[in-house]
């Protein structure tokens, strides 16, 4: 089996994308969501506290005599207040996840990734996933997260150690504010540090994606066949196209006025039809065995064959089939055609 060392082609990446195999770092999404949620909470907590402050007096002010109607009203009010409090948080998380996915993957809908794959049930594949490079990377990321959380938690407690004894002298509201600020600072530090892990994971996922899509020499050959077509088939098609073109050329040879030869290596058939072209044009040409075939058919069709080496070489090199002759060859071709017409006139007079 040939080694896969060639980078993936654009078609290979496009086929992989259709199957749901895309380059995406989940750590980037998680880190941005955490950072976004912390930012939303920082600015939304005051509003949350105000709404909760309005809710508690309402609950405490209810009559002690509970009825079915009062309980239903209470539950609806609590539910509505809960939606108002939590909606911005969930909306922010959803938008951040959506934007993060879109930036990395774009718009992609595929069912391929949802299809069951028997390879996932293989013990060998499972062992490779458990002890492969990816497993070690995932373990490393988990240990980094635990280490960062532990460090920032320790640093937060260490920096406020001298304040904790004085908390008993504060009111409940003041103590809550102090702890809220400490927790918010801890959350900021953790979320920002997780961005560093996300950057590491981003480059790792990119490396793994490119590695998994690498192609062998055989893969490149197979893709070339699928894209450009089988070389043998293309060669056969070109061969048939040349044969058809040759057949048409030999059929058109019947209408030629004269065949100019080299005399053996080249043959060019000319026709002058003022209705079709203002200048004489080439209807057939060839060299070597094709030139021989043109001469043989010219004799069969009783065409005039005229040897003119310079003119034959010039016509063969400068004029394609169906094209009119260039102006610099007008004089030489006119002399040839004049000779042909005189010859034909003599034959008709003799007849």
Image (cartoon, rainbow, N blue to C red):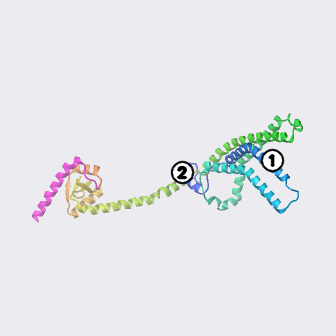
Q: Look at discs 2 and 1 and give the one toward the viewer.
A: 1
Q: Measure how far apart labels 2 and 1 are at the Cα level.
A: 58 Å
Indicate the secondary structure of the residue bearing disc 2.
helix
Q: Earlier in the sequence, mark 2 or mark 1?
A: 2
What residue do we see at 61% from left, 56% from top?
Answer: 20
Which residue is disc 1 drawn over? 53
Q: Can residue 211 be seen from the camera position used here?
A: no
User: Given the current orientation, which residue lies at the most extreme left position?
Assistant: 350
Residues at circles 2 and 1 in contact by the CB criterion of under 8 Å:
no
Q: Position of residue 281 (x, y in %)?
A: 25, 55
Which residue in the protein does label 2 denote? 10
Where residue 286 appears, x then y in whole percent?
Answer: 29, 55
- Residue range highlighted in magenta: 322-351
Which mark, residue 134?
Answer: none
Observer-nearest of 280 and 277:
277
Q: Main secondary structure of the magenta part?
A: helix
């Amino acid at each position: 089996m040939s080694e896969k060392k060639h980078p993936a082609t654009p078609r290979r990446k496009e086929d992989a994308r259709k199957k749901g195999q895309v380059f995406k770092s989940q750590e980037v999404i998680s880190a941005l969501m955490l950072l976004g949620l912390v930012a939303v909470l920082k600015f939304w907590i005051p509003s949350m506290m105000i709404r909760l402050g309005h809710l508690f007096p309402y609950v405490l002010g209810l009559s002690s005599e509970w009825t079915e109607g009062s309980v239903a009203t209470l539950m609806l009010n609590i539910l509505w207040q809960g939606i108002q409090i939590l909606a911005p948080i969930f909306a922010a998380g959803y938008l951040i996840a959506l934007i993060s996915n879109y930036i990395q993957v774009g718009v992609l809908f595929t069912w391929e990734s949802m299809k069951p794959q028997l390879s996932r049930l293989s013990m060998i594949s499972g062992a490779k996933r458990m002890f492969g490079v990816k497993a070690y990377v995932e373990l490393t990321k988990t240990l980094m997260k635990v280490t960062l959380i532990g460090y920032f938690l320790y640093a937060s407690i260490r920096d406020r150690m001298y304040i904790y004894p004085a908390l008993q002298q504060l009111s409940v509201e003041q103590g809550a504010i102090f702890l809220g600020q400490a927790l918010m600072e801890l959350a900021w530090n953790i979320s920002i540090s997780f961005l560093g892990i996300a950057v590491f994971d981003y480059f790792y996922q990119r490396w793994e994606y490119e590695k998994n899509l690498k192609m062998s020499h055989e893969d490149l050959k197979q893709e070339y066949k699928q894209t450009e077509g089988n070389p043998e088939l293309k060669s056969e098609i070109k061969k048939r196209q040349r044969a058809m073109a040759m057949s048409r050329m030999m059929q058109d040879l019947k209408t030629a006025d004269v065949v100019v030869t080299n005399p053996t290596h080249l043959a060019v058939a000319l026709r002058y039809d003022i209705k079709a072209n203002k200048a004489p044009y080439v209807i057939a040409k060839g060299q070597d065995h094709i030139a021989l075939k043109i001469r043989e058919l010219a004799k069969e069709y009783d065409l005039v064959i005229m040897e003119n080496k310079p003119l034959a070489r010039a016509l063969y090199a400068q004029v394609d089939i169906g094209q009119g002759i260039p102006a610099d060859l007008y004089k030489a071709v006119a002399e040839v055609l004049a000779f042909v017409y005189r010859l034909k006139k003599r034959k008709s007079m003799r007849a």
